[in-house]
Image: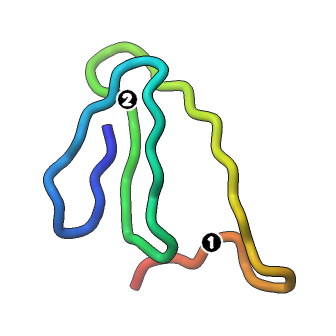
Amino acid sequence: MLALDGQPEKTFKAGQSLEVPNGAIHYEGAVGDKPAKLIAVYVVEKSKPLVTPAP
């Protein structure tokens, strides 16, 4: 499940991909009692932080 700020939650099936826009406030996680497995790739400018906490 992916919840992007201001948009309804979206559920994905195994094998589907998703993209979180740069700077988007979001939450992702498992739905139900089965764990979710994610592989994440981050493209970050040199000397910039990987993440920034939401205000």
How many residues crowd around disc 2 within 10 Å: few (fewer than 14), some, or many (20 or more)?
A: some
The residue that appears at 31% across and 37% down in the rendered structure is 1
Task: Name the residue that disc number 2 marks.
Answer: 30
Picture quadrant of residue 29: top left
Report x, y in % for residue 31.
29, 26
Q: What residue is at 58 percent from the left and 78 percent from the top?
A: 52
What kind of residue is marked 2?
Ala
Q: Nearer the viewer, residue 35 or 18?
A: 18
Going from N to C along the chain, the mark reached first, 2 or 1, is 2
Where's residue 8, x and y in %?
Answer: 14, 53
Q: Quadrant of the C terminus?
A: bottom left
Give percent across and percent down for residue 35. 45, 20
The outermost residue toward the left is 8
Q: In the depicted view, which residue is nearer to us: 34 or 38?
A: 38
Q: Relative to 15, say whether 17 is above or below.
A: below
User: What residue is rendered at 71% in x and 64% in y?
Assistant: 43
Coloring scheme of the render?
rainbow
Residue 51 image label: 1
Left or right, residue 39 beside residue 10: right
| Secondary structure category for the residue under label 2 | loop
Type of amino acid at the residue the image marks with label 1: Val
Badge 1, how many Cα within 10 Å: few under 14, some, many 20+?
few
CA distance for labels 2 and 1: 21 Å
Q: Residue at x 51, y 72 (%)?
A: 22
Tell me the element at label 1.
Answer: loop
13 over 52 or under it: above or below: above
